[in-house]
Amino acid sequence: MHLTRRTVSAVVTLAVTASLAVAPAVLTPASAAKAPSSDARTSVTAECAAAQSALVSAKKQKAKAKKALVKAKKSLRAAKKSHRPARITKAKKALNRAKHRYTVKSHNVSTRNKQMAYACSAPTSATRASSTGQQMDLLVMAQGGLTGLLGNSQLTALLDQILPGVSGILSPAQLTALLSGLNAGALSPDAATALLGGTFSPAELQALLGGTASPTLLLALVQHIVGELSGLTGGALPTSGGTTDLAGLQQTIAGAVGTLDPSQLGDLVRLLLNITGSGSTTLDQAKLTSLLSGLVPGLPTLTAGQVTGLLGGANAGILDATTLSHLLGNQVSPADIQSALGAGSDAVKAAVLSNVIAQLGTLSGGGLTLPSSLDPTAATTLVSTVTTLVGNVVASVPIVGPVVCTLLPILCH
């Protein structure tokens, strides 16, 4: 069968028309069909756009530095062929400058990449949560630093002190990312710049990193973290609910990470005395040392400053329950402390006493080890043992070894 030229033309036209109808679907790039990452923003914010622009600029400067480096290498090769020492020396110096400049520009690209990843991440993403954890670590470092890795209960205590109720709203994945960031180690100046360079000046960042930040600057960092935590909740908790009580937060941080000063530890000794029925007792150095030797394994010889601070706190009036809760890293509520000071159960008293003993354990030079919950029998035994110990101390009966090791072995490693 023979087709006429007109018929062939019509068939070709029809085929081309049909192919164009399906071409958009066929020719669409694979990247256009990708679902956005859960960490990515669904829209570009001004902060993200600025970070992207800064990255582009940094990459251009790196490329320019690369060209200069290649040119400097060529110049040195040419200088060596000339066998002229002065020219060779000059070319070597130029190459060293070009190498240094290229290193700096490469470093800038790396920093800008990190800054863009943070700025362009979704407010509720794991990336943002981890970065917020790192900012919390900076806040902790500004208060004296970590003595060990923190656990979930310590993270919860810090979060709810900064933005009350936030720990109950965040997802397990967000909490995990926050804890990972908090335990990632001290921020480097570059990492701090990537996370906070758009909010704080280089001098302010240096003060935060160096532990010389003023209360005003610390509170500014706290308010920034409040904003990040509010973003992680999707706005469920507004920033207006964030803390403005810097002193309370500082006490909670010190209690949570085990960096209470001797006077604050003395306040906890007073709490222990009151719970065990010896609230009217005034301690001297001998009785203080005897009491601590029965509570703290491996107690070293205390310095004069430690003794003065401990006695000052121990012999002062008892603090309010909220402040005492802060000093215990918010591991025990003010209501439970108030109950322990009254007619509370042995379980409540044991919870308070075990946390007090854990804080006093930092005198041995190790980090803070939080106690686990005790069963009813162990709780009653702990309260009875510590009460007897305090009574013996008051009566000047010699104390042999830390009596709590058999009751709270986790504290006696």
Image (spheres, rainbow, N blue to C red):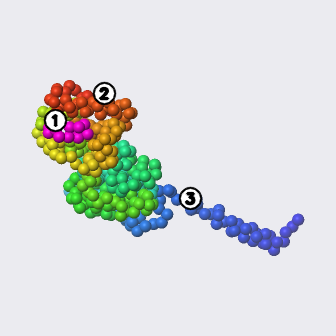
Mark 3 burial class by Cα count in 10 Å: few <14, some 14-19, many 20+: few
- Give the x, y percent position of residue 130: 39, 52
What's the residue type where badge 2 is placed?
Thr
Type of secondary structure dominating the magenta stretch:
loop
What's the residue type where badge 3 is placed?
Lys
The residue labelled by disc 1 is 288
Q: Nearer the viewer, mark 3 or mark 1?
A: 1
Residue pictured at 31% horizontal, 50% vertical: 137
Q: CA distance from mark 3 to mark 1?
A: 67 Å
- Give the x, y percent position of residue 323: 26, 50
Q: CA distance from mark 2 to mark 3?
A: 59 Å
The residue labelled by disc 3 is 34
Which of the two discs, 2 and 3, labels the residue nearer the N terminus? 3
Say if 166 sits above or below 305 in the image.
Answer: below
What's the residue type where badge 1 is placed?
Leu
Figure quadrant of residue 92? bottom left
The residue labelled by disc 2 is 406
Q: Nearer the viewer, mark 2 or mark 3?
A: 2
Residue 279 within the segment the image draws in magenta: yes
Residue stretch in magenta: 272-283
